[in-house]
Amino acid sequence: MNYKIIDRKNYYRKGVFRHFSEDCKCSISMTSRIDITGLVSYSRKTRTKFYLNFLYILSKVMNSREDYRMGYLWQTDELICYDVINPTQYVFHDDTETCTPVYTEYSEDYKTFYNNANEDIECAKKTREYGLDMLNHPNWFDASYISWLSYDSLNIELPDGHLFFAPIINWGRYREENGRLVMPVSVRLNHAIADGYLVANVFRLLQQEIESFVQR
């Protein structure tokens, strides 16, 4: 886990950061539907898992900009940027109706990430422990699939004043609309390090990466 310390005096969002980390501590979240028609088709054609393909694309997007890799060290009051952030995914157990967090390290190499994520999931299926360990996994973002519903809106509340910068990404079941398959995705970021543009940009980048991925 490597990171660099951000020089707040020269940080391009220093005014916004100061306001939303001192005067008005809050988060910003947005839900939108993305077109995953091509990714579903690709997954079926290649006999790969749509879930893992999307998780790879999502992880690639979240690592594509420093704005999405920010962190805060409260012990030293330092704003930092991680070299890489990794997805914390979840396995749901039907018998206990509980989830087990799954830590999967991001790799830009698709096959490496796909195989590792798949193995991590299989291991998590064997336990019923919650096992969330945020202290030892500071550079991990939440990637949670809500498989039971194709929802229209979702909002995650965190305590006011809590400078938690890791992205929280949720997505639901896809559904057909006007002959296309669309999937709801929700993005939550702390307002100190992201505004509406940066949140909306996640959806734009997801769409671009999906189109690029299926043309491989």
Image: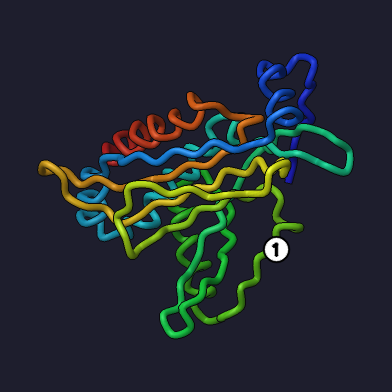
Q: Where the C terminus falls, by quadrant?
A: top left
**62 and 171: which one is in front?**
171
On the image, the x and y values in percent for residue 91 come to: 48, 69
Is 188 left, or right, of 193 in this rendering?
left
The image quarter containing residue 66 is top right
Closer to the camera in the image, 162 or 193: 162
Q: Could you tell me residue 172's position as x and y percent? A: 35, 55
Which residue is most to the right?
76
Q: Give the answer, above or below, for where 36 lies relative to 126.
A: above
- Neighbourhood count class around disc 1 (C-alpha, 10 Å): few under 14, some 14–19, many 20 upward: few
- Identify the residue at horizontal 55%, vertical 26% (top origin): 195
| Residue at 37 percent of width and 35 percent of height | 209
Q: Which residue is mark 1?
A: 133
Residue appearing at x 73%, y 27% in the figure: 23
Image coordinates for residue 80, horizontal then vertical, percent: 75, 34
| Relative horizontal placement of residue 61, taking residue 130 as reference (left or right) | left
Q: Is residue 152 left or right of residue 123?
A: left
* Residue located 83% across and 42% down the image: 74
Give the x, y percent position of residue 25. 69, 35
